[in-house]
Amino acid sequence: FFDLSWAHAVAEEALRRLRTECESKGRRRVFEVLNRYLGSERADISYKDLSSELGVSETSVRNLLHQFRRRYRGLLREEVARTVKANVDIEDEIRYLCATLSAQGG
């Protein structure tokens, strides 16, 4: 239970920071649309639908989602780094966090 709570708290804080960054850059709508796809496989994403929803080209959607995911991973890494004693433990903790969330479906 503690591990799952920790994993959710870390992921939520990274997501909160990403939302704040997007809002500060005038990209709240991009956040609202794309945050649902942070963990989605490419096959599960309709870039055409997202293109229509955001009013940008499919290429732009692909680039935005790539940047969005990269930044989220960076923020997640920063949050995990706050919870470990040594930087060498970060990758193991990230793998554990992902495995914990995956085992719970979220």
Image (cartoon, grey):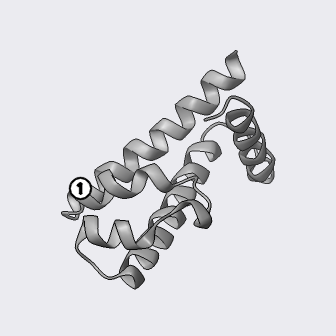
At x 24%, y 62%, the residue is 27
Residue 71, percent across and down? 48, 63
Q: Nearer the viewer, residue 19 or 54?
A: 54
Residue 44, percent across and down? 57, 59
At x 65%, y 36%, the residue is 83
Tell me the amino acid under the disc marked 1.
Arg
Q: Quadrant of the N terminus?
A: top right
Q: Nearer the viewer, residue 12 or 51?
A: 51
Q: Quadrant of the C terminus?
A: top right
- SS under mark 1: helix
Label 1 environment density (alpha carbons within 10 Å; few <14, some 14–19, many ≥20): some
Of all residues, the one furthest to the left in this rendering is: 26
Horizontal placement of 10 versus 105: left or right? Answer: left
Asked where in the image residue 68 lies, by quadrant, the reply is: bottom left
Residue placed under numbered mark 1 in the picture: 28
Q: Is residue 57 above or below residue 90?
A: below
Q: Is residue 76 above or below residue 83?
A: below
Horizontal placement of 95 versus 19: left or right? Answer: right
Residue 104, percent across and down? 69, 28
Horizontal placement of 91 versus 21: left or right? Answer: right
Horizontal placement of 80 versus 96: left or right? Answer: left
Asked where in the image residue 63 lies, by quadrant, the reply is: bottom left
